[in-house]
Image: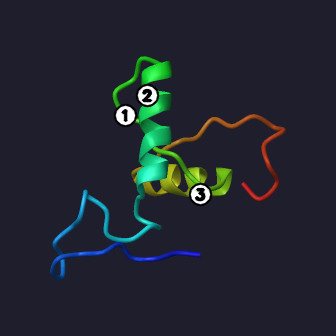
Amino acid sequence: MSSTYVQTAPSVLTNGFDYTRCGNPTRKALEDCLSALEYGTHTIAFASGMGAFSCIIHTLDFGSHIICADDVYGGT
């Protein structure tokens, strides 16, 4: 399920959120807590491991190398 957040006008974000799949207050709270626990500055939470993997793959340049364990999830 997804939903848009109340906006005062098109493209005017309320509290920084416009569409729940792009970000929402609950996920932001989780990311902030994980950053604090790990003494980090940024955290990105994904709904699945494949979502995280896909994001990482799409940030790599052509010809990049990946080191991967042999017991990784089969879909990977």
> Label 2 near label 1: C-beta < 8 Å?
yes
- Given the image, on which type of amino acid does mark 1 rest? His
Q: Which mark is residue 42?
A: 1
Question: Which residue is rendered at x = 42% and y = 46% of the image?
Answer: 28
Alpha carbon separation for disc pair 1 and 2: 6 Å
Alpha carbon separation for disc pair 3 and 2: 19 Å
Give whichever of 14, 35 is nearer the camera: 14
Vertical arrangement, residue 40 with respect to residue 62, above or below = above
Can residue 63 be seen? no
The local crowd at label 2, few if under 14, some if 14 to 19, many if 20 or more residues have their Cα within 10 Å, is some
Label 3 vs label 1, nearer the camera: 1
The local crowd at label 1, few if under 14, some if 14 to 19, many if 20 or more residues have their Cα within 10 Å, is few
Q: Is residue 18 left or right of residue 47?
A: left
Label 3 vs label 2, nearer the camera: 2
Q: Which mark is residue 35?
A: 2
Q: Which mark is residue 51?
A: 3
The local crowd at label 3, few if under 14, some if 14 to 19, many if 20 or more residues have their Cα within 10 Å, is few
- Given the image, on which type of amino acid does mark 3 rest? Gly
